Amino acid sequence: MRPRPAAGGGAGFSLLEAVVAAGLLLTTVAAVTACVTGVSRAGARLERTMRADRATLAVAERLRQLPYCAASYPARVGDAPAADLVAAVFPHAATWRSTATARYVAAAGDPQAAAGSFVTVVVEQGVRVTCVARFLAGPEGAPLGPAELAGWDLATSPRPPAPALEVVVSCAAQEAPGSGGRSVRLVRGALGPVLAARGPEGGG
């Protein structure tokens, strides 16, 4: 009498082979899912960065088109746009008049700006854009400090405290995470504007 073959021998997958195949399939699916997720996140980051760049450039261009200082200041009603660059980004040097979106920096240690700066936050195309302005002794001159700005208020002062303004326009860091931040530097005075685009913060 011939011996009967062992059960399960020689045909189909063994239990071990089935487990290995299932493991490989799950690993492949996980890798593909991770790849798709990574591409999707990268695309979302790129879109946020592009939106922040567009908003930053739009604000900088709007400021560039303003005259440095108007001959007179008409009364502003509601959210009417400022008549000139000075009114838009450095209307006063009084900390007590500061708000959450427009504030004068009188002392060192502020995380966003040096003493003697004015910080304005606007929302452009759904993006928070920050403008940091400083009065300059001239287009290539040194920035004025708090002592030189004491008492400045466009509503009562006959003229701006300096012949030029530097404005650095940038998007808030959370608006373009991973991009290093984008900024545009605008200097305007009697000789007209200078608009210089800059790369990520910390770079040239």
Image (cartoon, helix red, strand yellow):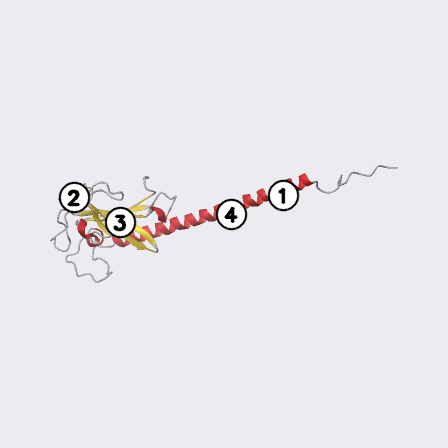
> What's under tag 3, amino acid-wise?
Cys
Quadrant containing the C terminus in the rendered view: top left
The disc at residue 36 is 4
Is 95 above or below relative to 75? above
Secondary element under disc 4, as helix, strand or loop, is helix
Q: How many marks do you count on the picture?
A: 4
First reached walking from the N terminus: tag 3 or tag 4: 4
Residue 26: x percent and y percent?
59, 44
| Residues packed near mark 4 inside 10 Å, few (<14), some (14 to 19) or many (20 plus) | few
Secondary element under disc 3, as helix, strand or loop, is strand
> What's under tag 1, amino acid-wise?
Ala
**Residue wearing tag 2:** 146
First reached walking from the N terminus: tag 1 or tag 3: 1
Which mark is nearer the camera, 3 or 2?
2
Which mark is nearer the camera, 1 or 3?
1
The front one of 109 and 38 is 109
| Residues packed near mark 1 inside 10 Å, few (<14), some (14 to 19) or many (20 plus) | few
First reached walking from the N terminus: tag 1 or tag 2: 1
**Residue wearing tag 3:** 131
Which mark is nearer the camera, 1 or 4?
1
Residue 86: x percent and y percent?
19, 52
> What's under tag 2, amino acid-wise?
Pro
Secondary element under disc 2, as helix, strand or loop, is helix
| Residues packed near mark 3 inside 10 Å, few (<14), some (14 to 19) or many (20 plus) | many
The quarter of the picture where residue 155 lies is bottom left
Residues tagged 1 and 4 counted as in contact (Cβ below 8 A): no
Spatial CA distance of label 3 from label 4 is: 37 Å
**Residue wearing tag 1:** 22
Spatial CA distance of label 1 from label 4 is: 21 Å
Quadrant containing the N terminus in the rendered view: top right
Spatial CA distance of label 1 from label 3 is: 57 Å
Residue drawn at (31%, 53%) of the image:
58
